Image (spheres, rainbow, N blue to C red):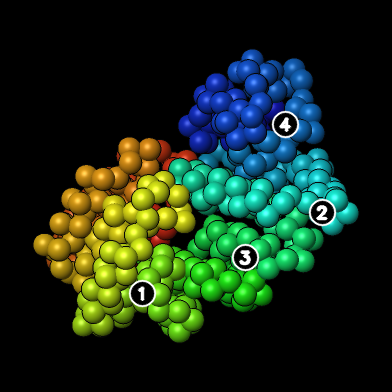
Amino acid sequence: MAMGHLIRDLRKARGWSQGRLASEINRAFGTALEREYVSRWERCRTAPGAFYLRCLSIVLDAPLAALEGDVNRRSFITDVAGTAIAPLVASDLLTAGFAARLDGGPSGEAWEEKLATYGTQYMTLGAADIQRRVAGELVIIQQQLDAPQLWSVAARLMTLYAKTFPGSDGSKAVGWYRTAARAADESGDERTRVWVRGRAAIALGYEGAALGVADVLADQAMAISDKPSLGLLNAVMGKAHAAAIRGDRDSALRLVDQGRRIFDASGSYDETSDYAVPHWRMNVFVSLLLARLGGEKGAVMAQDEARRELPPTLPRFATHLELHRGLMLARAGDKVGGKAYAQAALDQLPPEKHSLTLRMLMDEISA
């Protein structure tokens, strides 16, 4: 298939116009690409250069790995990168890695700014859109691990990278969470050690995946420090979700009460970062947990509270709340109605906004 035709098919598979594709590239890379250039590529009038090949691979590839239909499960990477994109990306990563070692790389402050940016982007773009970027950052920072602060940065980057894989795959996500915990220990920073383990625990508990690992990481975080913090809050809530899924209602509710006390002492005001737990997000945690326990009244109250404070820029989390209601219906005995309600809510969210966690929640409701 000609490269231009492949670009066109992948764009259409996402439901994007040529202008939308140009806008996505401009937003992600700070370029000024015009729609006409996309049109010329698709009509095979000209071919994208090395830079735009890399842009297209990042914008179009990862979210389309599981698509069926006209592209027949082919992704931009497998069709084009074998001869063009992959060597360019590998070359750039190797160059960046050696440069970081020879030149010292970004400062600790610059890395902290990068982390803050990724934390915000994750909330709106989702896992697939930033997986490649974070992988590139890990290649660079591994050449700079000469100071405790950079071990802390690396641990938090690894945690974010782990979240781009489903916890149920049994290897990638869990492996990265464990490596992140070891990197956090190298930093010697107590808050990082607790946060990395807690973030992994809530991610796995919320997904309902690798619950044994979620428990172990949560217990480690709680043993490191009992000081109220976002890391400890995540650990306790992750352990609560694991208990709820196992049907241990008493333990789950006890842990939720403990989590609420920690939240009162450490909840964050930042509304739109993956590193934050504001009031609306705490209610998202509670909403799913109570839905899993069949506590309809409490779950609905948590959903309503979350919905009132949820920033309009985060529609994916509004969909989370709707899927929680679908789960409640299914657990109440209306399995067909619960699944239909959840699927309708998921269908209203643009496909590019879907996440691994939403798909796993949908699977839980269907089961």
Image coords of residue 103 (percent x, y)? 85, 51
CB atoms of marks 1 and 3 within 8 Å: no
Residue 276 in view in this figure:
yes
Q: Amino acid at mark 1?
A: Val
Is mark 3 in CB contact (under 8 Å) with mark 4?
A: no
Residue 170 visible to the viewer: no
- Residue with the mark numbered 3: 152
- Crowding at dot 2, Cα within 10 Å, few <14 / some 14-19 / many 20+, comes out as few
Write down the residue under mark 4: 52
Mark 3 and mark 4 lie on one chain; the one further toward the N terminus is: 4
Q: Amino acid at mark 4?
A: Tyr
Foreground disc of the pair 1, 4: 1
Left or right: 357 in relation to 1: left
Which dot marks residue 236?
1
Q: Amino acid at mark 3?
A: Ser
**What distance separates the C-alpha of mark 2 from that of mark 4?**
28 Å
Most foreground residue, 72 or 95: 95
Q: Is residue 260 left or right of residue 90?
A: left
Please name whichever residue, 366 or 71, is drawn nearer the observer in this view of the structure: 366
What amino acid is found at the position of numbered circle 2 in the picture? Gly
Residue 224, how many percent across, how many down? Answer: 49, 81
Q: Nearer the viewer, mark 1 or mark 3?
A: 3
